[in-house]
């Protein structure tokens, strides 16, 4: 996942978006912390945690495409791809987003089933599905 043309901040944006979209509570906390560490603004992390696109246009394009892929089960429309490309991404990067979404969805599902305890260092980023924490 991390051998990509996408930056670590962009990858964390995808992973956080996927965790929220898949309602994976442990992953939301974990990727909130990592996104902040990678330079994603607190406001953008908060927006994603609330199911909204980030204010940063490129991160918003990534987040929106990831959410759309999950919501539409991979059946995105040409308009969905066009909006992503209009934000300055390349067509090949659509495949990178798909790869991140696929890999993280498996992890999100696993976490939702196993419900691992949240480590203390991520406690400040605790999130509950269906809330606006």
Image (spheres, grey):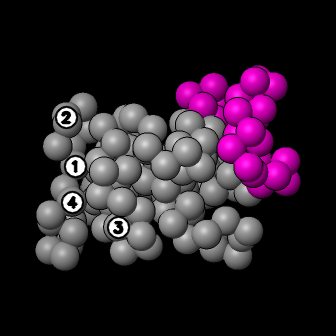
Measured as percent of width and height from the top left, residue 60 is found at 53, 43
Residue that carries the numbered disc 1 in the rendered image = 127
Marks 4 and 1: in contact by CB < 8 Å?
Answer: yes
Q: CA distance from mark 1 to mark 4?
A: 6 Å
Q: CA distance from mark 1 to mark 3?
A: 15 Å
Crowding at mark 4 (Cα within 10 Å: few <14, some 14-19, many 20+): some
Residue that carries the numbered disc 4 in the rendered image = 125
Question: Along the line of sight, which residue is nearer the eye, 36 or 21?
Answer: 36
Q: Nearer the viewer, mark 3 or mark 2?
A: 3
Residue 90 is covered by the magenta coloring: yes
From this view, report whether residue 91 is shown above or below residue 125: above
Measured as percent of width and height from the top left, residue 8 is found at 55, 71
Residue that carries the numbered disc 3 in the rendered image = 36
Marks 2 and 3: in contact by CB < 8 Å?
Answer: no
Residue 32 seen in the current view: yes
Residue 78 is covered by the magenta coloring: yes
Q: Main secondary structure of the magenta part?
A: helix
* Quadrant (top left, top right, bottom left, bottom right) of the N terminus: bottom right
Give the quadrant of residue 104: bottom right
Q: Nearer the viewer, mark 3 or mark 4?
A: 3
Crowding at mark 3 (Cα within 10 Å: few <14, some 14-19, many 20+): some
Range shown magenta: 68-95
């Amino acid at each position: 996942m991390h051998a990509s043309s996408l930056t670590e901040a962009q990858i964390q944006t995808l992973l956080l978006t996927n965790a929220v979209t898949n309602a994976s509570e442990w992953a939301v906390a974990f990727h909130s912390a990592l996104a902040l560490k990678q330079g994603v603004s607190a406001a953008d992390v908060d927006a994603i945690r609330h199911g909204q696109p980030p204010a940063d246009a490129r991160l918003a394009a990534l987040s929106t495409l990831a959410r759309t892929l999950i919501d539409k089960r991979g059946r995105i429309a040409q308009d969905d791809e066009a909006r992503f490309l209009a934000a300055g991404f390349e067509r090949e990067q659509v495949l990178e987003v798909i790869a991140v979404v696929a890999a993280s969805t498996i992890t999100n599902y696993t976490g939702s089933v196993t419900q691992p305890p949240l480590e203390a260092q991520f406690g400040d980023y605790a999130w509950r599905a269906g809330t606006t924490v």
